């Protein structure tokens, strides 16, 4: 059982770290800002996604959070990877920034 716990917490820490880093990048990286502008999304949408990612890291890490909340957090975290059209379609439809 100890090995399972170590694997669980290692993966959980990596997921939480990815969420925190992505949330920070939404606010600090100018390339992310220019990507959202290029895709035509409003600036508040980028900020909402950044805040949501930062908030989502908290219930994943804290052990006292009810299991149902953790399940919904995990369900919402990888959703863009299960819907590739939602992230690739704008890049296929819009011309590259150099052609605009």
Image (cartoon, rainbow, N blue to C red):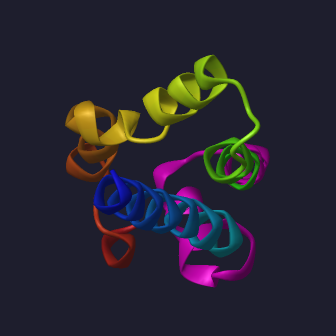
Identified at 38% across, 41% down, the residue is 78
Horizontal and vertical percent position of residue 25: 63, 74
Q: Is residue 34 left or right of residue 95?
A: right
Q: At 38% across and 33% down in the image, what residue appears?
A: 79
Q: Position of residue 37 (x, y in %)?
A: 59, 60
Left or right side of 4 for 84? left
Q: Looking at the image, which is closer to me, 22 or 97? A: 22
Rendered-image quadrant of the C terminus: bottom left
Q: Is residue 2 left or right of residue 68?
A: left
In the displayed orientation, state which residue is furthest to the front. Answer: 1
Q: Which residues are magenta?
A: 26-51
As rendered, which of 48 and 68 lies closer to the eye? Answer: 68
* Image position of 59 with respect to 15: above or below: above
Q: Is residue 98 magenta?
A: no
Residue at screen point 76% across, 38% down = 64
Estimate the x, y position of residue 17 in percent, counting from the top left. Answer: 56, 69
Q: In the rendered view, would you say 43 is above or below 84?
A: below
């Amino acid at each position: 059982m100890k090995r399972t716990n170590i694997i669980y917490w290692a993966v959980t820490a990596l997921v939480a770290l990815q969420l925190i880093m992505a949330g920070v990048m939404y606010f600090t990286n100018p390339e992310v800002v220019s990507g959202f502008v290029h895709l035509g999304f409003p600036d508040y949408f980028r900020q909402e996604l950044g805040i949501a990612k930062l908030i989502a890291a908290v219930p994943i890490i804290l052990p006292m959070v009810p299991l149902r909340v953790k399940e919904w957090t995990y369900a919402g975290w990888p959703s863009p990877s299960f819907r590739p059209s939602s992230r690739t379609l704008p890049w296929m439809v819009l011309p590259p920034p150099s052609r605009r």
